[in-house]
Image (cartoon, rainbow, N blue to C red):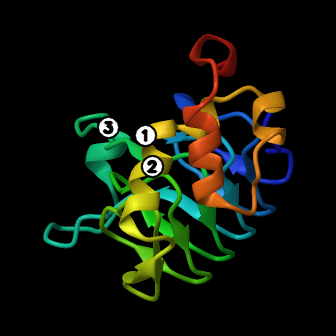
Amino acid sequence: KPNIDACWVGVEPYVIGRNSYVGEFSHVSQHTTIGAFTSIGNLCTIGAQKHPLDGLTTFPFMEVLKAKKQMETIIGSDVWIGCNVSIMEGVVVGHGAVIGAGAVVTKNVPPYTIVVGNPAKILKLRFPVKIIEGLLETEWWTLTSDNIRALPLGDPQGCIDAIRGMDKEKMML
């Protein structure tokens, strides 16, 4: 069961993957999917809804009256979201991404990319492209806990090599 006791998670539907946690005083909107092994800091807003700026009022009447469907927000697996981050509705944060504290994310974030700022901008990749491709190929977050514990966690290339050598039928959940 994910740690969501000290935060506010919106009305269903939403999904929070295994071993993921949401920090205190954070808000996760409905229509949000969060992958496995994702860490969300305190005071974050995930799936923040947009308000109309070109009408009579900024109040979201269309959403309240159910005339407009909310867009799904997707946070991949192995994502780290720092404290006080806002991620707008409809954004997709790729597997392995890192969102720096205080960032405002208005656009999709590629896998294994570090973004910072307001609006969030790419700072750098976490790993060289070949390692990113290998990590995405292995989908390590789908392994059993025992298989993950057996990996050389401080060596991404070593993990990729080890996963490629595992018996496929015994390694997945």
What percent of the width, then of the height, locates residue 29? Answer: 53, 47
Reading the image, the residue beneath label 1 is: 137
Q: Element under label 3?
A: loop
Residue picked out by circle 2? 134
Q: Residue 64, which numbered label? A: none
Residue 163 screen position, x and y as percent: 61, 36
Residue drawn at 83 percent across, 44 percent down: 3
Instruction: Inspect this view and state whether residue 143 appears.
Output: yes
- The residue closer to the viewer here, 117 or 131, is 131
- Tell me the amino acid under the disc marked 2: Gly
Residue 83, horizontal then vertical, whole percent: 69, 75
Gap in Å between the C-alphas at discs 3 and 1?
42 Å
User: How far across and how far down the image is residue 115, in percent?
Assistant: 45, 78
- SS for dot 1: helix
Q: Which residue is mark 3?
A: 65
Q: Give the crowd class for mark 2: few <14, some 14-19, many >=20 residues within 10 Å.
A: some
Quadrant the C terminus occupies:
top right
Along the viewing direction, whichever of 77 and 150 lies nearer the viewer: 150
Disc 1 + disc 2, Cβ < 8 Å: yes
Query: For residue 84, which quarter of the picture?
Result: bottom right
Tell me the kind of residue under disc 1: Glu
User: Is there any visible trace of residue 16 in the rendered image?
Assistant: no
Which residue lies at the image location 44% right of the left edge and 45% below the top edge? 136
Q: Is the residue under label 1 in contact with that under label 3 (CB below 8 Å)?
A: no
Is 71 located above or below residue 59 in the figure?
above
Label 1 neighbourhood size at 10 Å, few (<14), some (14-19), many (20+)? few
